[in-house]
Amino acid sequence: QLFSSVEFGRRWLLLHEGVTPNRFYWSMMGNGREPDLVHLEARTVDGHAQYITCKMQNCSEATRSKPFPGYIDHNSLIVQGDYVFVQLTSGGRPHYYVSYRRSPFAQMKLPKYSLPKDMHVISTDENQVFAAVQEWNQNDTYNLYISDTRGIYFTLALENVKSSQGLEGNVMIDLYEVAGIKGMFLANKKIDNQVKTFITYNKGRDWSLLQAPHTDLRGNPIHCLLPYCSLHLHLKVSDNPYTSGNIASRDTAPSIIVASGNIGSELSDNDISMFVTSDAGNTWRQIFEEEHSVLYLDQGGVLVAMKHTSLPIRHLWLSFDEGRSWSKYSFTSLPLFVDGVLGEPGEETLIMTVFGHFSHRSEWQLVKVDYKSIFDRRCAEEDYRPWQLHSQGEACIMGAKRIYRKRKSEKKCMQGKYAGAMTSEPCVCTEADFDCDYGYERHSNGQCLPAFWYNPSSLSKDCSLGQSYLNSTGYRKVVSNNCTDGVRERYTAKPQQCPGKAPQGLRILTADGRLTAEQGHNVTFLLQLEEGDLQRSLIQVDFGDGIAVSYANLSSTEDGIKHIYQNVGIFRVTVLVENSLGSDSAVLYLHVTCPLEHVHLSLPFVTTKNKEINATAVLWPSQVGTLTYVWWFGNNTEVCI
């Protein structure tokens, strides 16, 4: 049962019963969406699932809407930002549907060779859908797909991304979206039974291995040559707000990533160390030889590290130079079994709270640590230096050059409020700013060419004469890429007029799908055309009862062609559709009947033995079509038909 309250929980209103747990959403703001609209998945009386929306103050039967026609699979509704997703299984195969900005649902299009058995929506940031799809032949990996803006057409971004089961049976995909830098992701990919960490700066168009540090914690050189050896990271994010996961980044510290991992040919659960990057993944440094929880304070101006251990501790480590050097501090006089750490909310926070217990029998202890006294002043303009975001020297990331402000490592001052990027200027578009469009694949020469399963002319077949469609060049610009000019005009899809086609594949059927109808009642005929345009064709219909009609456009037949038969019988209905390029016809046989309302039997009350009599059946109405008469006479079992 789903309840709502608009009185701070004093009184509650029952909205709906049979709601699927964790499949309800509300207060989805933005883009004109209504703040009090509730989205929910509910079970019907006969056990099916439906997607329903209603107002939080009133969810009566009369006010409910069903945005998706028909039933959906149980536990499949997802409402995330501008997108709504549902799943519907038919013929043993799941089909996935999406609604962008609450528009009508459309089926999500994966490459034709894809046979998905499971799908998870990873991200809907920046007006694009990241989806992890498990193919029929995959068990512990998923393929990563990325969509166009509407979330309909998907292209492959990365194959065989590692997955695992969470504590509650949920599927976790080894993909991490780096905070503060749009388009930057880390993923663990399985290659020949080895798991390796890859990084992308352009939303999955290009992936590369991580360069390992050149020296270890003690300054000894590390001999690790790409692609045989690289840095691999654990990408699990903690569901517990009091403990950190294996990796952390912050919007207010866009260049700093802290993660646990190892150096070698593959990701391992042994010999785990802690690593940090302060230049957005281009170079990495080893900071600890054991796992630590790391907190960001003062926009990453202060990093606090606490050892992962089951033993009691009394020390923590602080870094004021983005993890280059660390100082040891005592935070409690007695060793504490640490259960968790919390940073105080807010961009300018310099306060953290450690909670735990002194012994297994003692109550929880809370230790508040305030670092403000470490700084004697706020940072001034001269304490900062510019830093340009780049990918191995390439300054154009997602079509823009972005310069950030960083505190100089030797300065020890409090930063305060985060200002974001100092400058951002668009780059000239190059081929690197474009990914292959749906139905196209990148070949060894770098060109995007049609895949074996895709016919580029199929798009023009789906549109009608007089309309236009986007004729793909084989490329589409990476969503949220800000580049301008350059090759943009050459690579951008061009609108083209839909070609005219002769009518083909005409069908006529009744609205209820039956080939029988009753006399005096409306019969609705529907026309379907595989190729061609009904709206721009001449339509002639002969109902077979001496009446024929013609239509010059579809507007009068959008709801079907209606006709009333005054007589009973079997009628041959023919339809002809023609335009300047050709014609097509179809036939339907309709049996019109009239329900028999009354039968009166007429025969003499008295007669003599062995004398012939007349027995008459009088019907009302008299014209009811084809009938079968069955006569029984007395106790004789003989039947006359």
Image (cartoon, helix red, strand yellow):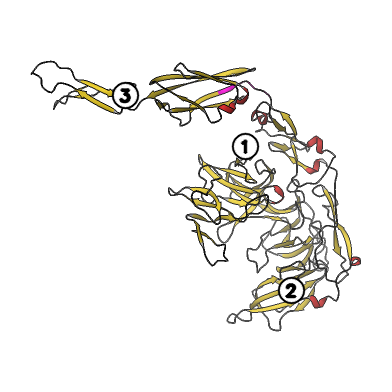
Residue range in magenta is: 499-505
Picture quadrant where residue 338 is located? bottom right
Residue receiving disc 3: 621
Using the rendered image of the protein, determine whether residue 394 is visible from the camera's viewpoint. no
- Determine the main secondary structure of the stretch shown in magenta: loop
Residue designated by label 1: 112
In this rendering, which labeled residue sits more in front, label 2 or label 1?
2
**What secondary structure is marked by label 3?**
loop
Query: Number of numbered discs present?
Result: 3
- In 3D space, how far apart are the residues under numbered discs 3 and 1 (Cα atoms)? 58 Å
**Dot 3, how many residues are within 10 Å of its Cα: few (below 14), some (14-19), or many (20+)?**
few
Q: Is residue 615 above or below residue 108?
A: above
- Please name the amino acid that badge 3 sits on: Pro
Q: Residue 588 in magenta?
A: no
Q: Sequence order check: which comes first, mark 3 or mark 1?
A: 1
Please rate how many residues cluster around mark 1, counting C-alpha atoms within 10 Å: few if below 14, some from 14 to 19, many from 20.
Answer: few
Q: Amino acid at mark 2?
A: Ile
Task: State the SS at label 2.
Answer: strand
Q: Compute the Cα span from label 2 to label 1.
A: 54 Å
Q: Is residue 381 above or below residue 228?
A: below
Identity of the residue drawn at 76% across and 56% down: 230
Q: Which residue is mark 2?
A: 351
Q: Amino acid at mark 1?
A: Lys
Residue at 8% across / 18% down in the picture? 608
Q: Are marks 3 and 2 in contact (CB under 8 Å)?
A: no
